[in-house]
């Protein structure tokens, strides 16, 4: 097949997209599939409109005009002699070194390819298909460390726009975790509170070690959810991850935690964590 990659027509074996592409690393991309029957595009106007809506809703500029988009669809059919099948197209925000925060001057990555198949004589139309029910778990399986990170990335960009560094996600009034870290509080009586493990949050490796060192240091630990209001009233708040280790949070939605400075328990837990991990690093 001849595929389209960023303005060039190349054989599928030659087509390349960067490993730093945000579509690959963050699912920061939009796609469309348009059926082709007898060399004609089925429902093209609807697909073109939805594509633009999707791009606009996550702030990716359009790497095409109305005319060029239709011309590309016609050209990919012609170059591949495709009469029946589908055109797949994907546009990502572009490529740059991996970071949840993205630059606003990225050039989108735009790829298109065809898939030949007999659309109109699908044998399953005669037999019908079997289905099973599944819990609606799309975007709800955060314990799996997938690259489905688009919402996290958009949320962190919103934090940046508001002059903040990161986010705390809230679900049903309770904090799940931070944008790319687990969230913890130290209550005024010195208890470390962190949400219990479930599919609501990533099971942080750093979180687990922090709980170990805290228990070893006779710090009281409670694994339960806490609300933003409880976090605001807490003595200290911090987040944890392999990237940030133990990071103090000094304000939430512009309101200071305690005196608005990193607290002593957070510093102590970071010291204990680093000491423990460096002793066991291999
Ligand atoms: N929660 C989320 C959503 C994360 O992305 C991460 C790390 O990237 C964490 C928590 C912390 O996990 P770990 O301590 O294993 O890095």
Image: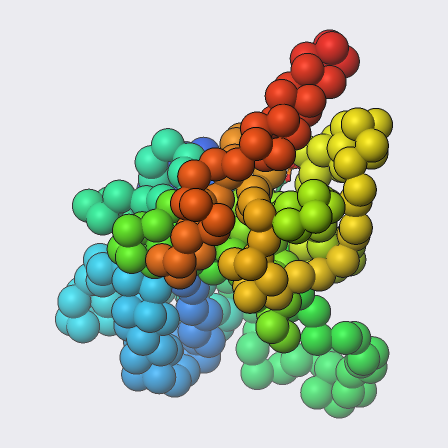
**Dividing the picture into quarters, in which one does residue 52 lie?**
bottom left
Residue 55 in the image: state x and y as whole percent.
32, 66
Residue 78 visible in this rendered orientation of the protein: no
Nearer to me, 64 or 152: 152
Horizontal side of residue 35 vs 5, given as left or right:
right
Q: Residue at x 56, y 77 (%)?
A: 119
Residue 67 in the image: state x and y as whole percent.
16, 71
Nearer to me, 132 or 162: 162
**Dividing the picture into quarters, in which one does residue 95 lie?**
top left
**Dividing the picture into quarters, in which one does residue 231 lie?**
bottom right
Residue 239 visible in this rendered orientation of the protein: yes
Q: Residue at x 46, y 70 (%)?
A: 33
Q: Residue at x 71, y 61 (%)?
A: 225
Residue 120 in the image: state x and y as whole percent.
57, 83
Query: Which image quarter holds the C terminus?
Result: top right
Horizontal side of residue 215 vs 117, given as left or right:
right
Image quarter for ligand 1: top right
Nearer to me, 259 or 111: 259
Residue 40 in the image: state x and y as whole percent.
36, 79
Residue 19 higher or lower than 254, as above or below: above
Q: Residue at x 66, y 50 (%)?
A: 187
Report the label total.
Answer: 0
Horizontal side of residue 195 vs 65, given as left or right:
right
């Amino acid at each position: 097949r001849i595929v389209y990659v960023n303005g060039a027509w190349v054989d599928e074996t030659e087509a390349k997209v960067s490993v730093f592409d945000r579509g690959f690393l963050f699912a920061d991309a939009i796609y469309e599939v348009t059926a082709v029957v007898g060399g004609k595009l089925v429902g093209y106007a609807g697909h073109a409109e939805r594509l633009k809506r999707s791009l606009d809703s996550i702030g990716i500029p359009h790497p095409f005009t109305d005319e060029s988009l239709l011309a590309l669809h016609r050209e990919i059919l012609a170059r591949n002699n495709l009469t029946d099948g589908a055109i797949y197209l994907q546009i990502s925000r572009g490529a740059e070194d991996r970071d949840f925060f993205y630059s606003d001057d990225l050039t989108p990555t735009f790829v298109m390819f065809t898939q030949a198949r007999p659309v109109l004589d699908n044998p399953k139309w005669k037999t019908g298909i079997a289905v099973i029910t599944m819990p609606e778990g799309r975007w709800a399986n955060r314990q799996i460390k997938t690259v489905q990170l688009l919402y996290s990335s958009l949320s962190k960009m919103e934090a940046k726009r508001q002059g903040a560094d990161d986010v705390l996600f809230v679900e049903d009034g309770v904090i799940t975790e931070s944008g790319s870290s687990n969230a913890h509080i130290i209550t005024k009586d010195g208890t470390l509170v962190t949400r219990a493990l479930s599919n609501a949050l990533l099971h942080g490796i750093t979180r687990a070690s922090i709980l170990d060192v805290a228990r070893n240091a006779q710090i009281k630990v409670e694994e339960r959810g806490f609300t933003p209001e409880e976090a605001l009233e807490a003595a200290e708040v911090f987040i944890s991850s392999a990237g940030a280790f133990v990071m103090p949070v000094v304000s939430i939605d512009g309101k200071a935690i305690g005196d608005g400075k990193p607290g002593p328990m957070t510093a102590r837990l970071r010291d204990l964590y680093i000491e423990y991990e460096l002793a066991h690093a291999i």
